[in-house]
Image (cartoon, coloured by chain):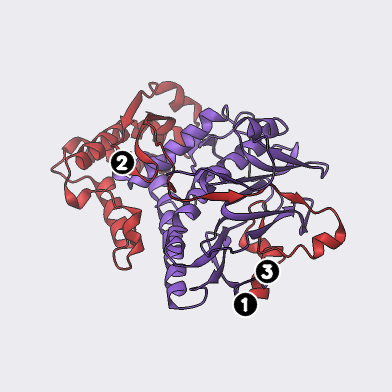
């Protein structure tokens, strides 16, 4: 049932993506993408709720100065969400023209790994591929001398209990499972 | 644990973010003072910022809006492109065992860079701790961690590798002065890793641990190797990675992508 929404939005999506790219490359400081780096400074949080809300509003409502078309086509976003839920999904799917595939290229961005440029292949509103036009290269810790050894198996029960470890590496554990974990025991011992 | 450096003990902090424990161990000059507090706060701020941008659980994150087609890449922070580029590189190098485009419960392919974000974010957050002079640290996010030793003649951090079949004990210990340790498996969260090529949960391995210079790639490689199953061990060795795999029956197998054994120095740049 979501497909018809996707189909209905496909035109909008393309326009939105193109506008989004266009806007940012025009370099208006107000619309420049925030950097995570600024998050380091309290009070300059790039992803603050205010900023997020403002950006959401901008993309969903479309200012009249851009063009009237996106505003009009954006209207169905509220319509079909209730409409198709009752109808069969097969009919709209077959009736809809196949969504066109677009490639939307992002700007070149500087990273700790070097300059990076990525293009997204978008079909309708679904991202179908990520293409890397410019690869990151190099080591972000170029002045870091890395040193580590191979793991040493601790088979004996005695060794396991007295392994004298500082931290535990394990399969991703959640906060829920943390209370019973070895890491939790270590953290409590040091507090 | 109360390992010591000089006469300074290991000081620990824990915070729960994004549904997982973030654990920090500090030792040395600024292990337990105002500078340590400040650095720890920066670590938390960076991780929270990353979550706001990348979380697939937040409908208002940049990645969620990018996935829905509401935003263009150019509207996202530059870090999004950086992470996507890393993920795409991982997909190619793993023959598709690592993929950011995964079918969701709705049957539609969604953008999910979570497999890149965790290690990358911790590595990024560690920068605040790197700035602490004469202070060693080990920073872990849900079992994936970064170690640094800056104090002269300081001992290596001793990292226990959890036994996936018995999470209350360790199966191995790895000493790390400077580097990263990442482990992928199903031990705590159940079936959270899916082989993108088959859509199924891999079962040949119980866990894969990668020890390397950089947590971004240690985490990616551990995840990809786990998805590859038995073939993941050979794949890691071909990539020149070190670590270990625990097979489904509990047998541990060391991965040594380099011929010589013992402590070594890698990645030295002038």
Disc ID at residue A109: 2
Q: Earlier in the sequence, mark 3 or mark 1?
A: 3
- Outermost residue on the left side: it is A65
In which quarter of the view is residue A51 placed? bottom left
Q: Position of residue A6 (x, y in %)?
A: 40, 34
Residue appearing at x 71%, y 49% in the figure: A151
Colour that chain B carries in the picture: purple
Colour that chain A carries in the picture: red
Q: Circle 1 sits on which residue?
A: A191
Crowding at dot 1, Cα within 10 Å, few <14 / some 14-19 / many 20+, comes out as few
Disc ID at residue B208: none
Crowding at dot 3, Cα within 10 Å, few <14 / some 14-19 / many 20+, comes out as some
Q: Secondary structure at mark 2?
A: strand
Mark 3 chain: A
Location of residue A65 with respect to A11 vertically, above or below: below
Q: Position of residue B115 (x, y in %)?
A: 54, 44
The quadrant of the picture occupied by the C terminus of chain B is top left
Q: Earlier in the sequence, mark 2 or mark 1?
A: 2
In which quarter of the view is residue B243 placed? top right
Q: Circle 3 sits on which residue?
A: A186
Q: In the depicted view, which residue is nearer to us: B28 or A6?
A: B28
State the separation of the CA atoms marked 2 and 3: 40 Å
Q: Position of residue B102 (x, y in %)?
A: 54, 36
Mark 1 chain: A
Crowding at dot 2, Cα within 10 Å, few <14 / some 14-19 / many 20+, comes out as some
Q: Position of residue B224 (x, y in %)?
A: 61, 37
Residue appearing at x 18%, y 46% in the figure: A63
């Amino acid at each position: 049932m979501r497909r018809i929404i996707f189909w209905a939005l496909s035109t909008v999506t393309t326009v939105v993506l193109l506008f989004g790219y266009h806007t940012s490359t025009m370099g208006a400081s107000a619309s420049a993408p925030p950097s995570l780096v600024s998050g380091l400074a309290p009070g300059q949080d790039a992803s603050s709720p205010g900023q997020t809300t403002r950006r959401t509003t901008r993309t969903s409502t479309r200012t009249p100065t851009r063009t009237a078309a996106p505003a009009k086509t954006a209207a169905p976003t509220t319509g079909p969400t209730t409409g198709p839920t009752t109808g069969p999904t097969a009919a709209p799917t077959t009736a809809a023209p196949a969504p066109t595939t677009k490639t939307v290229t992002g700007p070149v961005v500087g990273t700790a790994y070097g300059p990076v440029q990525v293009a997204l292949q978008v079909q309708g509103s679904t991202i179908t591929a990520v293409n890397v036009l410019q690869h990151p290269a190099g080591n972000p810790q170029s002045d870091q001398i890395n040193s580590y050894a191979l793991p040493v198996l601790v088979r004996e029960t005695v060794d396991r209990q007295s392994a004298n470890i500082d931290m535990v590496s394990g399969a991703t554990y959640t906060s829920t499972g943390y209370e019973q974990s070895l890491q939790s025991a270590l953290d409590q011992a040091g507090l | 644990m109360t390992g010591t450096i000089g006469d300074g003990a290991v000081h620990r902090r824990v915070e729960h973010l994004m549904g997982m424990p973030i654990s920090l161990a500090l030792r040395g000059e600024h292990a337990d003072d105002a500078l340590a507090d400040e650095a720890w706060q920066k670590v938390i701020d960076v991780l929270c910022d990353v979550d706001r941008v990348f979380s697939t659980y937040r409908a208002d994150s940049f990645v969620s809006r990018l996935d829905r087609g509401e935003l263009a890449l150019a509207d996202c922070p530059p870090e999004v492109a950086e992470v996507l580029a890393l993920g795409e590189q991982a997909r190619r190098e793993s023959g598709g065992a690592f993929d950011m485009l995964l079918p969701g419960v709705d049957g539609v392919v969604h953008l999910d860079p979570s497999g890149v974000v965790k290690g990358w974010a911790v590595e990024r957050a560690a920068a605040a701790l790197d700035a602490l002079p004469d202070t060693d640290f080990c920073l872990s996010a849900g079992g994936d961690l970064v170690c640094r030793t800056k104090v002269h003649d300081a001992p290596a951090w001793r990292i226990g590798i959890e036994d996936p079949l018995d999470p209350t004990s360790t199966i191995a210990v790895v000493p790390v002065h400077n580097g990263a340790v990442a482990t992928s498996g199903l031990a705590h969260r159940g079936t959270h890793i899916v082989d993108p090529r088959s859509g199924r949960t891999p079962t040949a391995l119980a866990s894969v641990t990668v020890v390397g210079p950089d947590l971004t790639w240690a985490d990616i490689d551990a995840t990809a190797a786990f998805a590859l199953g038995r073939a993941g061990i050979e794949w890691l060795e071909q990539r020149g990675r070190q670590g270990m795999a625990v097979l489904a029956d509990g047998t541990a197998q060391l991965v040594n992508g380099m011929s010589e054994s013992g402590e070594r120095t890698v990645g030295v740049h002038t």
